[in-house]
Image (cartoon, rainbow, N blue to C red):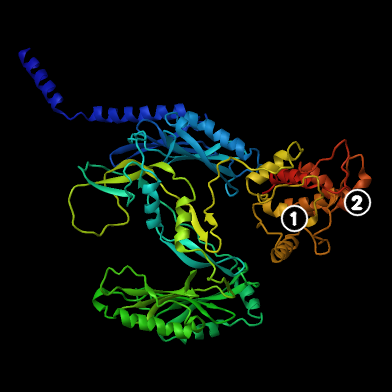
Amino acid sequence: MKRMVSLLLCLCLVLTMLPPVAFAAESDADAMKSALLSVKRRIDIPSTYSQFEYQSDTINGELNWEFFWNDSNGGFLSVTADQAGRIIRYQHSVSNASENLPPKMTKDECVSAAKNLLAKTHPEIADKLVFESVTPSRYNNTFEVTFVREEHGIPVTEQSVRVRIDYRTGNCISIYASIVYDAEIKAPGTLVGSDVLFPLWEEMADLTLEYEIDSNSVAELWYTVKGEIRPINAETGEIIPEDVIWEKGESEDSSASGGGGGAANETFRDQLTPEEEEKSLELAGLLSKEKADAIVRSYAALALGKNDSLYSAHLYRDTHAYGAEKEPRSYWNLEYSGPVTKGKNPEHAYACVDAKTGTLLWFRAYRDTAKENRKLSESAAKTTAKALLKVAAADAVGKTDDGLRTDSGKDEIPAEYRFCFRRVENKIPVSNNQITVSVNSVSGKVTEYNRTWTENVTFEDPTAIISADAACDLFVKYQEPKLAYYTQTVYLYDIDSDTETVDWYYSGIPTEKKITLSYLGPDNIRRIDAKNGTVVAYAEIQTKPSGTYLDIKGHFAERDIQLLLDIGILSENQKYFKPNDQVNQLDLLYFIFAAHPRYYTYRIDNKEEVEELYKNAISQGIITEAERNPSKPVTRAEAAKIIVRCAGYETIAKNPEIFRTDYHDPESIPQKDLGYVVVAKALGIMQGSDGKFYGNRVMTRGEAICMICKFLATVR
């Protein structure tokens, strides 16, 4: 018996010495459950989402949970939350997300829905979130509503919540919250005045007189803000020089796990296929690819070897005319490949040549930059760059400055010397007009050439303008200082360093947030008219949820017009919609093309774009060439034909003999249009009233919008 007791005591002693693995796992489980329960109190999870998974991330000592719910039909819901269960990110994709539905909620309604939702999802901070802006997206059928955090009635920078609401269903698609809950935010004390702020703003603004070329190719004189307007500590008057702070601290062990990313697809607008390319070459004045190639090779300074072959050539047509350009421009995009060595990628070079004028616009080559082989001096590199300008940009010689070196300048002999020759007119620099040249320090050849130069420009007379001092006065007095809590990142380091070189991106470093009451300054001022002192600011942030037309209140089409206005289909640049006016053929086609997700939105005040609209409408079978009549008022029967063609039911509808109608006014419907009227009714796109269709009556603009809203539900 004593022996048995002794064994039991020994066993107990051994068990007490084992590590508490089970208890640690149980602690993690409790933490996960706690966060999960908090999340489930904040959001509604559909009962069909029975599949669940989770994972955790610990970054900078902060534990976050990621929760995932699925259903068997492809519905997906994910939430990222902190240990307290506060939602950082929410995403919801329903299984029928691709279903075509018409817009249902206005901008105002979506803003209200987002605000009500945050009261439940973010109760700790909801009463401190103030509406900032709302942005429609026709790509994913949503309004994105942004709220910013305010403390003591003052906005906090870099702290906001963005909510996306599907305007077809009212469902929340996503929430992104950037909130620092435990940061110290003090109430305002004694603040510095304008006598401290204004001199600092003047110094930081660095107002520079320069020409800016407008859309009519008129170069106007402006004083432009070139300096960076840094925040100023509102209580001390000191400039806050950086967005990050380095402080001595103790690092803690941290681990991180995460997912992957994806690559963005790159599309090229209006590029030609080989067949279209062949036809375009028949146009008068365009160069062949052989001629464009010869032009590039004629510049001996370019880093293009005699053994480099033309690997590909593509003729690109930019169909949008800019400024004084009245015709689309064509360019040859050329790619060169060097000799191929087994097992190695060859060297490449790229060039762009104006296919009409033969002007070299762009060149880039990637060549040896090994440090031990660099030998070219700066003066020799600049001589090479200037020599190329004389032959490749002879028209610009004498119209640029001497060329400013714009590479980093860190190395005594860099891999490439980069010079920017800025355009100058009347001894005043021209904004966004320059020629950039890079010279390889190993070969002495030009590896980059980039010409940005606006043609046919009328420059304003610089003699009658306000002084720079007057411009500075206007700059600082334009608006009241904006008080805000300014957020900085504090990096906690372990080892002191004397180096001045810092990386642009940091990872794996413990961080904290420091919030300082600051004046942000008038950083929204873009420029000041040098002629009359008019101050031009960047676009003001929208402070009201919605705009509207002044003549739609109480109209039967009011809601549909407002819906299409809110999501960007109708223009906001007019006060009146005129819903009772007759709709003509051009306006109806414009409405359809603007609303349809597969079509481009054309400007009907531009003759070239109107031609393009009709070209596409005819090629898509929406109207025929014989039916083209832009100013003709459209009857309801004609509108039925156009909209049914858009919906893709032309093949059936064009056979009137197989249709009959129960409308009481069949005589108002031309026999050839009967099928279209019946199909439009069957699709729910068009209805009559009082049992009649009124097919020969001209459609109003308000009726057209109601028809298009119903049509959007049929688009596949």
Residue 158 appearing in the image: no
The extreme top residue here reads 1
The residue closer to the viewer here, 403 or 266, is: 403
Classify residue 321 by image quadrant.
bottom right
Q: Nearer the viewer, mark 1 or mark 2?
A: 1
The residue closer to the viewer here, 545 or 400, is: 400
Tag 1: residue type?
Answer: Leu
Q: Is residue 225 left or right of residue 531?
A: left
Q: Point out the tag, 1 or 2, that comes first from the N-terminus.
A: 1
Quadrant housing the N terminus: top left
Q: Report the number of numbered marks.
A: 2
Figure check: 208 above or below 91:
below
What x and y, as percent, mark residue 148?
Answer: 46, 39
Tag 2: residue type?
Answer: Gln
**SS at circle 2:** helix
Write the residue at 49% across / 48% down: 479
What x and y, as percent, mark residue 96?
Answer: 59, 40
Residue 415 appearing in the image: yes
What x and y, as percent, mark residue 621?
Answer: 76, 59
The extreme right residue here reads 667
The extreme left residue here reads 2
Task: Find out whether the residues at labels 1 and 2 contact each other: C-beta distance under 8 Å.
Answer: no
Residue at the spot of label 2: 671
Residue at the spot of label 1: 589
Write the residue at 26% across / 42% down: 254
**Distance of label 1 from label 2 (alpha carbons):** 23 Å
The residue closer to the viewer here, 337 or 443, is: 443
Classify residue 593 by image quadrant.
bottom right
**SS at circle 1:** helix
The residue closer to the viewer here, 505 or 388, is: 388
